[in-house]
């Protein structure tokens, strides 16, 4: 029997169907709420509002569980490659050897970016933040790659997907190289996905660049951990823009812009800058914990702490924290901010302010420490997040289109002036 929820308002009772997901999440279906009652709901930040049904990612914030298409994040991070996970998120199943070979080869053969796109780079100030450059160049892809052959919409979408996955690392590294005044590197088709990215990021014409397998493995784990996270701010942005039938490049470009915010993906850059400030200030973590507890007067937040959904340890933060120790010791890097981060975590997790608000380290708290040990500059941290999140954005955009979701258009409660007469300027 389908369950229902009863609502009594203005003395009348209404019934709304309820539904339950495969992991037993429950929802009231209020699609007919306004038609039946004249009421809308109000839910600032959509803290209690499900925007869609999705089969891509499941997370349980209370238990600290994260699964992509039913596979535990711990398994995928330890056993899969980033492109395998990209295929899983986008097409719903782990690829067979043959499927993987076709997918990976297609990506390898589309890493080159239209040469005219380089002219767009030249229009940016050299020190432009790479996230602004990335969002602009991805949006520009709609001008360079929209008129494509392909028998069906599905074939066309598959080619757009390959082009995005293949070209994002190239575009990302170009903004970094330009900011250094270094020549931009072209991709090398003989290199795998992550080694190709590293070579474009760090190689110089004047010396050979040796790709370190420790760095490749660490990046593989980080990209997998960032690959999707259900209906977060940037993913919801991609779905909302895509729901108007805007093309995939414009939708992804909007997602990159949303991710840039310091409360979202931009937090990984903020964390390192915060840890550096604590270090420069003598390393007294309790002082900063106190500042965070008085956020209303200090305006200070512990970046990398807290989460809209996780009210337990972010499972990604657990994996990244362990990886940070492994990678830094393998690379022989001794980064003092790692100890400051651990001290901050220890102090916060024993403080009632954080315990009562269930504020734990999130994915951004330790990731920057690894990026830095890999030689990636701070202002490229959120770009790394975007490269990792790209398959998730694509998967969610594709699902939204396949589900034929209606255009997203929330309602509001109006609180402005009621109807009033217009007074001509001569009389004002
Ligand atoms: C990501 O949604 C996703 O899935 C995102 C993400 C993904 O993979 O896509 O996981 C990636 O964005 C991770 C989050 C990165 N952001 C940060 O690290 C920024 C610092 N964290 C916060 O700003 C905050 O925790 C948010 C934005 C992450 C969540 O904000 P909410 O859910 O709106 O919670 P809130 O701001 O209402 O906070 C509740 C309380 C408040 O105190 P009171 O008003 O109850 O007194 O907790 C406090 C907040 O002041 N609080 C913090 C805090 N985060 C929340 N206090 C100090 N330091 C913090 N970091």
Image: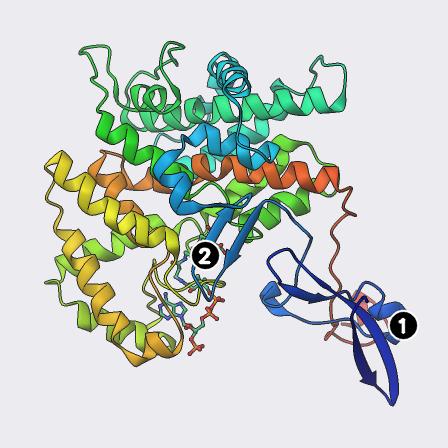
Which residue carries the number 2 mark? 65
Tell me the quadrant of the picture where the C terminus can be found: bottom right
Give the secondary structure at mark 1: helix
Q: Note whether ligand 1 is within 8 Å of mark 2.
A: no
Residue bearing mark 1: 36
Residue 377 seen in the figure: yes
- Residue 316 higher or lower than 222, as above or below: below
Which image quadrant is residue 402 in? Answer: top right
Residue 212 location, x and y as percent? 21, 24
Could you say where residue 348 lies in the image, as x and y percent from the top left?
Answer: 26, 71
Q: Is residue 188 left or right of residue 405?
A: left
Indicate if the residue with disc 1 has its beta carbon within 8 Å of ligand 1. Answer: no
Give 214 or 386, whichever is nearer the viewer. 214
Q: Is residue 148 above or below residue 311?
A: above
* Residue 122 shown left or right of residue 56 in the figure: left
Left or right of 101 in this view: 195: left
């Amino acid at each position: 029997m389908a369950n229902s929820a009863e609502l009594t308002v203005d003395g009348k009772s209404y019934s709304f169907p309820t539904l339950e997901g495969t992991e037993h999440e429950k929802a009231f279906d209020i699609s007919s709420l306004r038609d039946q009652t004249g009421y809308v709901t109000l839910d600032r930040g959509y803290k209690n509002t499900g925007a869609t049904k999705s089969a891509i990612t499941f997370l349980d914030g209370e238990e600290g569980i994260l699964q992509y298409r039913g596979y535990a994040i711990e398994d995928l991070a330890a056993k899969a490659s980033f492109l395998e996970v990209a295929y899983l998120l986008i097409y719903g199943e782990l690829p067979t050897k043959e499927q993987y070979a076709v997918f990976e080869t297609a990506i390898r053969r589309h890493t080159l970016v239209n040469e005219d796109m380089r002219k767009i780079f030249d229009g940016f100030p050299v020190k432009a933040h790479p996230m602004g450059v990335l969002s602009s160049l991805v949006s520009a892809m709609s001008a360079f790659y929209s008129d494509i052959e392909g028998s069906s919409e599905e074939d066309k979408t598959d080619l757009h997907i390959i082009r995005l996955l293949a070209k994002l690392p190239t575009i990302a590294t170009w903004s970094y190289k330009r900011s250094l005044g270094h020549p931009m590197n072209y991709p090398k088709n003989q290199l795998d996905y992550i080694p190709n990215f590293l070579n474009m990021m760090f190689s110089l014409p004047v010396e050979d660049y040796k790709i370190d397998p420790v760095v490749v493995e660490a990046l593989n784990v980080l990209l997998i951990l960032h690959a999707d996270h259900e209906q977060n701010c940037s993913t919801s942005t991609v779905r909302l823009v895509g729901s108007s039938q805007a093309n995939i490049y414009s939708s992804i470009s909007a997602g990159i812009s949303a991710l840039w915010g310091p409360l979202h993906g931009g937090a990984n850059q903020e964390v390192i800058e915060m840890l550096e400030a604590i270090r420069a200030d003598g390393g007294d973590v309790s002082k900063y914990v106190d500042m965070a507890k008085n956020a209303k007067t200090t305006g200070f937040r512990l970046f990398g702490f807290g989460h809209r959904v996780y009210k337990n340890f972010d499972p990604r933060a657990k994996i990244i924290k362990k990886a940070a120790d492994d990678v830094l010791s393998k690379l022989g890097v001794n980064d003092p901010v790692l100890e400051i981060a651990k001290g901050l975590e220890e102090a916060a997790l024993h403080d009632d302010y954080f315990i009562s608000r269930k504020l734990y380290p999130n994915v951004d708290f330790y990731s920057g420490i690894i990026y830095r040990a890999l030689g990636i500059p701070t202002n490229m941290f959120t770009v790394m997040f975007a490269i990792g999140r790209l398959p998730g954005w694509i998967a969610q955009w594709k699902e939204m289109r396949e589900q034929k979701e209606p255009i997203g258009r929330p309602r509001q409660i109006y609180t402005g002036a009621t109807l009033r007469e217009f007074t001509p300027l001569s009389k004002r």
